[in-house]
Every structure is written in structure tokens, then in C-alpha cells.
Image (cartoon, coloured by chain):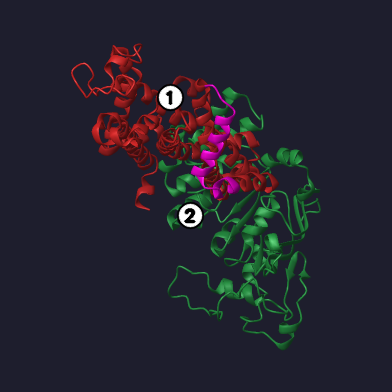
């Protein structure tokens, strides 16, 4: 008790509990299913982003002499009706599908997170306005809304290279309301906790309340719902592209590659055209969901039991 | 009593819940959590507020610190009406008036290390330099019976008693003049309660802090408080010094409460006043004297007429027709 503040400088090494993030990582690593999901996701990412460098067909593109070949030693997954190597296209399509999924997720987490925090923290009229807009967007059925937006964009003749950004934006417009509601309700429930009343009693600034007290408590929620929403975004993008409203050829996405299943001949006779992209979507979304579930369990072990 | 102005003056405080019925202005029953309560707390004293659950103790505590809006009345701190200050003025006042919460488990943010939780208000109010924070945190931790060893740990690594010490450390690091302690020991088990109560006595002795101590445990209040107010259904029933109240309770409710305090001596026989029934629904309080439904001495007059809260001797107030 006698020791003055000076001693504090000498023994700087006070026991420091491992941070909550490290504990989360430890719990995550114990979950086999989510590790499988993570491993497959890493594989898909490498496949899509590194894979094309090993393919001899990347710059070749259309090859009229080699159309609709079945899988062989030269073309492992065969070629399509323009003679393009399906495996290479699958990789390139993976880049776009993953990027669209990730981009849409980031945008909806940013929009939904910021608006949700503002609603929950300031309440009152701001909350009313934001939540009514979210309500309207949530009552409109998502898919028709996307179709209408996409149709309008097609009318505007947006250059194909910008289309993927626009698809991201459209998906995040549909995606943010759910997130905003989730974040808002979390903020509201945190605000009723005594430690938030304590910040009031201590007279802390709003910025400190928001960034030091509220934000760290909702980041796990954002990570989990963000991860899970990537899967949803990839699915929506595939749906749009399948109908020719999302990413359009010559850009490949898994969704527009499946379009070939639309023709009866390709569907019956050339499964190498549509089975690989279908499997890629299926497995990617499943592994994202496994990863998301694993993250959720790791971050809040109580959630699983509920 | 000294003649200097009181540090805290509560005048005709009223807090009603559920007044406006939301969007469609439905008629929602009004709960009068606090109904016309007045009292003063003098500099350096510890004022005890006792009552059953639902009697409005915590509501009064939170209203004094403006952690809650009030329906009517005034709360003066050093002559200034707390509820009429601007937000900026209120923020400047905050460090001087602190609150200690009942539940040590939920009053600490689970994601903030204890040292940061205690020191952050100092930084936020610019009350000391950044490099001094650690030593100040260490100082208050030691006053509260913890050590710098605990600074980098998370709240979930502590027991209830330790967490309550952390809550106390967080309040006193700002060197407040006034602290509202809202049932600070009721969530702890008895052996830990004693330690925390001793910590409070130490703070009273060493730091000249004025306390409002809220509790439903009369023996705790007797140990710490110099003046005591007894609440029932949001109304003050009796107010007086500890000696006056414990040696000669005037209000039947106070008598009943005191007769229920356990005495650690099985051979001692005494008369217990057993109250009938439960505390009435505060949304629909009894007419006249609110206590008449359970009072063993109630008369017809008590059912009709609200008793005046009158001074019977110096500094002693009672709201009862029979006194």
C-alpha cells in the first residue's frame, strides 16, 4: 500500500488476460465443421484468384475449332459452345461471384450498421425515418425488386465492366434493412444494460459511448451476420445472372454459366457446362454458412443453446 | 443540524410512469413511482433511504442524478436545479455526482478491461494527463481493496464482491462530492456484504463524501447512515435521525419494519408486528393514507384523508394521523 506511483513504471509487466478475440479464435479452432468450411473457402479463393495463372486458355477466349468438347486431357471440364475452356471460365467466374458476394456484404454491413447504430442510439424522429424506409424495403419482395432494378439498368445501357459494381449496390440495397434492424435492436437492448447507464452517470461523451462501449459489443454480430450474408449475396447474384440481369457475358459468373442448362440439348447432353458452376455455388454457400455458424458459436457460446 | 445550505435538496419530486399511451394516446394506467417526496441531504452526511421493492427508492436515486427524467418537482445540487441544466452543464457536473449500481455483474462492460473502465472517465473529462491515469487507477484500486495486478483483466474474471469494488473505484476516482449508492450490497452474499459496508465506512471517514444510501436492509442502513427516510409506495412515511428512528419509531410502518430486523440472539423475545398482505399495486394505490390497507392501527379517517408529512420534533417528519 505504501508503494507510490513510481513503482508502476518499473514493473510494467502486469498480468494481462488474453483478449476476448484470442479466446474466440481458440473456440473457433475447436469446431471441425467450420474449419472444413473455412478450408474449402480458402481452396475456392485460391482456385479462383490464383488458378487462372496456371491455365493456358485464359487469353485464348473463343476457339471456333473446339466447340462443345466433352472433358478430356486438354480441357478437363470440356469447352462451351464458343470453344472456351470451362475450367478456366469457372475460375474467372469464381472471381466475380466471390467479389460480388463480398462487395455486397461490405456495402450492406456498412449501410445497415451505420443506419442501425444511428437509429438505436439517437432514437426519436431519426429512428422513425430510417426504420420506416427499412420497413418499406423489407415488405417489397426481394427478387422482383432486383429484377425491376436490373431491367431499368439494362435500359440505361450500363457498360459491362461496371455492371458487377451495380449488382453489388443492388444487392446491398436489398440487404441492408435486415442488418439495420438487427443492429438497432442490439443497440436498444445494450442501452438498457446497466453498464450503458453507467456511461451516462460518468458523463462520457457520445463518441466514447458509441465507439468504446457499443461498437465492440456489436462487432461480433456484424461479423457473423456479414459472413452469412455473403452466401445469400452469391445466391442472389447467381439468380440475377441466370436470368441475364446480373453479370452478363462476356464476363463470366457462376450464375450466367448455369444459363446453358436452359437449353434442352445442353441440359441433357452436356452436363459439364452447368454441373461445375452449380456445384461451385452450392459448395461455396455451404462453406460460408458453416463458417458463419462456427464464428457465431465461437463468439457467443450461449447462442447455440438457445 | 447545521444551518448551512444542504448539498442536495429534493422538493416535491414526482415521477409517474406510463403517462402517454404511445402513438394512439391510449389510456394507460399511471404508476406513481415517486409521489411528492421532499428531503434534504447535508454535506458530509449519509442519508439512508429504505423501503420495500417497488417503493420508489431507486427511482429517487436515479432522478437525483438525472439518469431519468422527472414528472414534477425540483432536485437542487448545491442550489442548482439538476433537471434544468443544459447538456453541457450537466456533463461538467457529472464527475461530482456519482452512482454505484446494484448489480455488479451488469454494470461493467464485458468488453472493457477493468483498468480502462475505471480510468476512462478521467480521460474523457480531461481531469488528468494520459500518463497519470494508470497511477490514479492503481491508487483507487488499492483504496477499494484490489491491486494494480487486476488492471488488465476483464470483468468476467472477478467475483461479485470484487466487481462491486471495481464499481466503487470507478465512482471515487472522479473525486465526487456526492454518491448515490443504489442497494450496493443486496446482490452480494452476507460475508462479502460486510466487507463492502466496511469499505463504505472507510470512504465516509477518509474522503468526506456525501452519500445517499439506498437499501432495503435496515441493519445495513443503521450501520452507515446518520439520517434515514422510510418510503412506502413512492411516499415518504417517516424521516429522522438514526437515533430517533431506531429507538423510537413513530410510524406504524417503520415499527413493523424494525420489528422484522433479525437479531442474532435466539433468547431475546420481542414483539413482532406482522403486516398482512402484500404491497398494493402501485398503479392503483389505496385512497387516503397509502398504508391503511396493511396498518394494524388504521381508522376510518386513514382511509379517506391523506396524512400530512409534518415535523413532529426538530428534523423529524412523520406522515400519520395517529402521531
Residue of label 1: A249
The majority secondary structure of the magenta stretch comes to helix
Mark 2 and mark 1: Cα distance apart in space: 73 Å
> Where does label 2 land, which residue?
B193
Q: Nearer the viewer, mark 2 or mark 1?
A: 1
Q: Which residues are magenta?
A: A135-159
Colour representing chain A: red
Q: Secondary structure at mark 2?
A: helix
In this rendering, position of residue A88 left or right of residue B42: left
Image coordinates for residue B276, horizontal then vertical, percent: 56, 81
Residue B205 visible in the shown view: no
Residue A58 is covered by the magenta coloring? no
* Residue B3 makes an appearance in the image: yes
- Residue situated in front as seen by the camera: A116 or A15: A116
Q: Residue at x 37, y 33 (%)?
A: A259
Left or right of B316 on screen, residue B257: left
Q: Residues within 10 Å of mark 1 (few under 14, many from 20)?
A: few
Q: Which chain is green?
A: B
Callout 1: SS: loop
What residue appears at the point 64 percent right and 77 percent down from the top-left corner?
A: B252
Question: Image height check: is B295 above or below A81?
Answer: below
At 28% across and 30% down in the image, what residue appears? A276
Q: Are marks 2 and 1 on the same chain?
A: no
* Residue at x-position 55% and y-position 50%: A139
Please identify the quarter of the rendering in which residue B307 is found. bottom right
For residue A68, above or below residue A236? above
In the rendered image, residue A300, in percent from the top left (x then y), is placed at: 39, 43
Question: Disc 2 sits on a residue from what chain?
Answer: B
Q: Looking at this rendering, what residue extends furthest in the bottom direction? A: B300
Indicate the quadrant where residue A76 lies.
top left
Q: Magenta includes A148?
A: yes
Quarter of the image that includes the N terminus of chain B: bottom right
Amino acid at each position: 500500500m505504501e508503494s507510490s506511483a513510481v513503482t508502476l513504471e518499473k514493473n510494467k509487466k502486469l498480468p494481462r488476460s488474453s483478449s476476448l478475440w484470442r479466446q474466440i479464435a481458440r473456440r473457433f479452432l475447436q469446431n471441425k465443421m467450420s474449419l472444413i468450411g473455412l478450408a474449402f473457402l480458402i481452396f475456392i479463393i485460391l482456385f479462383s484468384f490464383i488458378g487462372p495463372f496456371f491455365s493456358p486458355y485464359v487469353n485464348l477466349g473463343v476457339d471456333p475449332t473446339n466447340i462443345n468438347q466433352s472433358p478430356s486431357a486438354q480441357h478437363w471440364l470440356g469447352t462451351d459452345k464458343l470453344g472456351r475452356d470451362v475450367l478456366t471460365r469457372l475460375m474467372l467466374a469464381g472471381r466475380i461471384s466471390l467479389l460480388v458476394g463480398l462487395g455486397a456484404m461490405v456495402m450492406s454491413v456498412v449501410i445497415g450498421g451505420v443506419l442501425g447504430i444511428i437509429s438505436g442510439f439517437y432514437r426519436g424522429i431519426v429512428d422513425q425515418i430510417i426504420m420506416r424506409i427499412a420497413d418499406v424495403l423489407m415488405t417489397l419482395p426481394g427478387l422482383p425488386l432486383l429484377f425491376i432494378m436490373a431491367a431499368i439498368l439494362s435500359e440505361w445501357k450500363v457498360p459491362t465492366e461496371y455492371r458487377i459494381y451495380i449488382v453489388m449496390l443492388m444487392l446491398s440495397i436489398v440487404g441492408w434493412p435486415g442488418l439495420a434492424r438487427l443492429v438497432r435492436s442490439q443497440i436498444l437492448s445494450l442501452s438498457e444494460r446497466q453498464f450503458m447507464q453507467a456511461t451516462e452517470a460518468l458523463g462520457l461523451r457520445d463518441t466514447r459511448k458509441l465507439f468504446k462501449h457499443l461498437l465492440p459489443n456489436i462487432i461480433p454480430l456484424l461479423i457473423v451476420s456479414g459472413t452469412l450474408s455473403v452466401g445469400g449475396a452469391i445466391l442472389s447474384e447467381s439468380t440475377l445472372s441466370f436470368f441475364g440481369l446480373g453479370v452478363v457475358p462476356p464476363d463470366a459468373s457462376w450464375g450466367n454459366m448455369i444459363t446453358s442448362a436452359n437449353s434442352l440439348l445442353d441440359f441433357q447432353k452436356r452436363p459439364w457446362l452447368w454441373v461445375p458452376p452449380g456445384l461451385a455455388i452450392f459448395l461455396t454457400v455451404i462453406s460460408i454458412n458453416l463458417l458463419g455458424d462456427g464464428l457465431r458459436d465461437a463468439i457467443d457460446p450461449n447462442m447455440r443453446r438457445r | 443540524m447545521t444551518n448551512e445550505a444542504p448539498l442536495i435538496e429534493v422538493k416535491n419530486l414526482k415521477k409517474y410512469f406510463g403517462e402517454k399511451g404511445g402513438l394512439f394516446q391510449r389510456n394507460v394506467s399511471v404508476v406513481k413511482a415517486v409521489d411528492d417526496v421532499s428531503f434534504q441531504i447535508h454535506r458530509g452526511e449519509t442519508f439512508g433511504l429504505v423501503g420495500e421493492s417497488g417503493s420508489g427508492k431507486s427511482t429517487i436515486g436515479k432522478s437525483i442524478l438525472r439518469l431519468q427524467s422527472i414528472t414534477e418537482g425540483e432536485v437542487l445540487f448545491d442550489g442548482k436545479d439538476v433537471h434544468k441544466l443544459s447538456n453541457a452543464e450537466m456533463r461538467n457536473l457529472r464527475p461530482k455526482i456519482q452512482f454505484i449500481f446494484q448489480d455488479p455483474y451488469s454494470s461493467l462492460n464485458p468488453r472493457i478491461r477493468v483498468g480502462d473502465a475505471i480510468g476512462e472517465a478521467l480521460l474523457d473529462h480531461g481531469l488528468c494527463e494520459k500518463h497519470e491515469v494508470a497511477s490514479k487507477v492503481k491508487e483507487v484500486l488499492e483504496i477499494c481493496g484490489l491491486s494494480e495486478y487486476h488492471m488488465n483483466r476483464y470483468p468476467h474474471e472477478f467475483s461479485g464482491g470484487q466487481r462491486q469494488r471495481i464499481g466503487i473505484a470507478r465512482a471515487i476516482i472522479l473525486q465526487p462530492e456526492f454518491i448515490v449508492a443504489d442497494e450496493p450490497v443486496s446482490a452480494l452474499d452476507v460475508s462479502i456484504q460486510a466487507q463492502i459496508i466496511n469499505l463504505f465506512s472507510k470512504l465516509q471517514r477518509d474522503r468526506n463524501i456525501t452519500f445517499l444510501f439506498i437499501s432495503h436492509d435496515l441493519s445495513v442502513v443503521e450501520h452507515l447512515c446518520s439520517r434515514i427516510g422510510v418510503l412506502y409506495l413512492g411516499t415518504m412515511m417517516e424521516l429522522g435521525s438514526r437515533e430517533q428512528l431506531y429507538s423510537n419509531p413513530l410510524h406504524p410502518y417503520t415499527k413493523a419494519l424494525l420489528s422484522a430486523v433479525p437479531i442474532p440472539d435466539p433468547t431475546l423475545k420481542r414483539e413482532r408486528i406482522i403486516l398482512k398482505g402484500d404491497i398494493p399495486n402501485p398503479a392503483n394505490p389505496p385512497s387516503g393514507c397509502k398504508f391503511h390497507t396493511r396498518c394494524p392501527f388504521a381508522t376510518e379517517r386513514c382511509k379517506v384523508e391523506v396524512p400530512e408529512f409534518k415535523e413532529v420534533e426538530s428534523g423529524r417528519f412523520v406522515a400519520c394521523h395517529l402521531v
